[in-house]
Image (cartoon, rainbow, N blue to C red):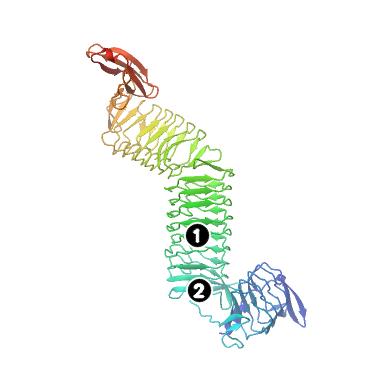
Amino acid sequence: MKLLPLLLLLALPTVVQAQFTFTTNNGAITITGYTGSGGVVVIPGTMNGLPISKIGNSAFSGKQNVTSILIPDSATQIGGRAFFGCTSLTNVTIGNSVTNIGNRAFYGCTKLAGVHFRGNAPSLGLSVFANDPNATIYYLPGTTGWGSTFGGRPAVLWNPTVPFNYTTNNGTITITGYTGSGGAVTIPNSINFLPVTTIGNLAFQFSFVTSIIIPSGVSSIGDMAFEYSWLNSLTITYGVANIGNLAFAGCSSLTNLIIPETVTNIGENAFSGCSFTFVTIPNSVVSIGDYSFSYCSELADVIISEGVSNIGNNAFYACTSLTGITIPDSITNIGSQAFYDCGLTSVRIGQNVVSIENNAFLYCFNLAVIVVNEQNTNYSSVDDVLFNKSKTLLIQYPLGKTGGYTMPDSVANISDYAFTSSALTSIIIDDNVTSIGVIFQDCESLTNVVIPNSVTNIGTGAFVNCFSLKNVTIGNGVTDIGSGAFSGCNVLQSITIPSSVAIIGNYAFSNSKNLKGVYFQGSPPNVGSEIFTGDGSLTVYYLPDNTGWDTTFAGRPTALWLPQAQTIGNSFGIQKNKFGFNLNWASGQTVVVESSTNLINWQPVQTNTLTTGSAYFSDPQWTNYPGCFYRLRSP
């Protein structure tokens, strides 16, 4: 038992002499200062062939970059204030020959958790461990001079038997596996008198551990370290810097999380599927990894501290209880689908965001408000809608925003899925827009759409599953209607296709079950397969004098499209000493209205050119007839 620590120390690598300043006296060396980069410091037993016998007064005083110290068996003294104010120091191992420790040697080492003695109890100066609130003294079996306390700190027998597999590297311990039966587990500060600094990949994966305390000496939690374990309680102590990919993924019983301000990296899927209700991301974190909090369905409140710069792809994917988020000014990037399918009702975006990746807020069905800091030079918001700064690109319409919407005149492009699944009821698209992609998919409340003449392409799936869509006006600049563009528009009864359309893609109007008439203003376009499948008793109509039409089109019967008088609605009937009704036909067509009192002699009453596809006809002479009939014809 006593030989094992000695053998471990002898196996440690040689430390570069340049890390220390020293003096030589009577054939022995005193360390007087430390100039190294910090971390785990192993003081060698000899230097220049001479034994190191003393750690001099104030040799490491104030060295805040040192986290762990190993003092060799050759040393007999530790001078006064030797490690005074080493505020990052968490573990110390003291060799078996030390007989005296000077005044305030470890005073103010506020994170010091374990002091491991390999020999008998040395004599102590004043306040050696004062202001070290977390320190515990450990001693070996068979050594003498120990009590229940030592230097004012609790003293316990050190038992190196632990329920872990582990490896040793450069004087530190990495836990690689867990051999215990589960339940509550505390990771020790050290094993075999060496500091535990890493919990390795897969170390506790699928274990029955229900509670874990990770001490301050641990700096890294590896990939999948606790994945799918039975954890319901987690304490990560100040000192951990890295939380690896999938580190706690699938810990569905884990309901509490406090991320210490030493963590700089949260890996991909780190806490995916956990049951937290509240999380604060400290300002030490540089990046929130992809999927890091995805599927945390109970997560209702997230505070992202000023200092975090990146929110990764799908970082909060499907956090359905998350209702509000404020993006601080330090954030520069919001990843693709970062808040996909969250319960968000409002989003506030800081002034330094330079990149919002695709579909960052897609399927946030309750989102009604998006507000961008006015100082942001890349993005803006108008009426709670997200745009680029110049407002030429509409990026995201809040899906929970209800009512109609008229697009600003500045808009030239619309991002894919910008209106997908929104509560929008009607829209007038700005006439600078040239293409409509996958924009209005699953807009179940959308009833009316006006597509301007500037649009040339209606993309694949643009209006798919818009179950309430009743009225669509397609501008005469559209040349291409993409596959599935109006598929599943169940209440759409008729639609007019302008003469500019040359291509209609596969399934373009499929499963629009109430579609009765498709009215073509030009010659037959090229069509894909099954464009009208599932559309019930649909008839295709075409205008007189347009060539290329047959008795069927795309498997549906065709008929001549004739002008119609609307006999329903408020416009039909007697109107202030005149009789009238609306005329409907294709835009640009001319309709002659004729009247007769006997169905034999017909006289033209009015000629109308339907510039917008409709016009109002009235006959002020109707009171002069005992009865009158009207009919419509082309010139």
Position of 532 relative to 25 (above/below): above
Q: Which mark is residue 177?
A: none
Crowding at mark 1 (Cα within 10 Å: few <14, some 14-19, many 20+): some
For this orientation, the residue located farthest to the right is 25
| Image quadrant where residue 625 sits | top left
Q: Position of residue 250 (x, y in %)?
A: 43, 62
Q: Secondary structure at mark 1?
A: strand
Which quadrant would the N terminus be assigned to in this image? bottom right
Q: Does residue 48 appear left or right of residue 356 in this picture? A: right
**Camera-side mark, 2 or 1:** 1
- Front residue of 606/544: it is 606
Q: Is residue 139 above or below residue 526?
A: below
Q: 321 and 462: which one is in front? A: 321
Foreground of the two, 594 or 91: 594
Q: Which residue occupies the foreground of this view, 431 or 25?
A: 431
Q: Tell me what residue is drawn at x 28 percent, y 26 percent.
A: 559
Q: CA separation, marks 2 and 1?
A: 23 Å
Quadrant occupied by the C terminus? top left
First in residue order: circle 2 vs circle 1: 2
Q: Is residue 612 visible?
A: yes
Q: Is residue 628 above or below residue 396?
A: above
Q: Which residue is mark 2?
A: 186
Instruction: Report the amino acid beneath label 1.
Output: Val
Residue 372 relative to residue 36: left or right: left
10 Å neighbourhood of mark 2: few (<14), some, or many (≥20)? few
Look at the image and tell me whether residue 39 can be seen: no
Q: Which residue is mark 1?
A: 279
Q: Position of residue 298 (x, y in %)?
A: 43, 58
Residue drawn at x 58%, y 52% as measured from the top left: 330
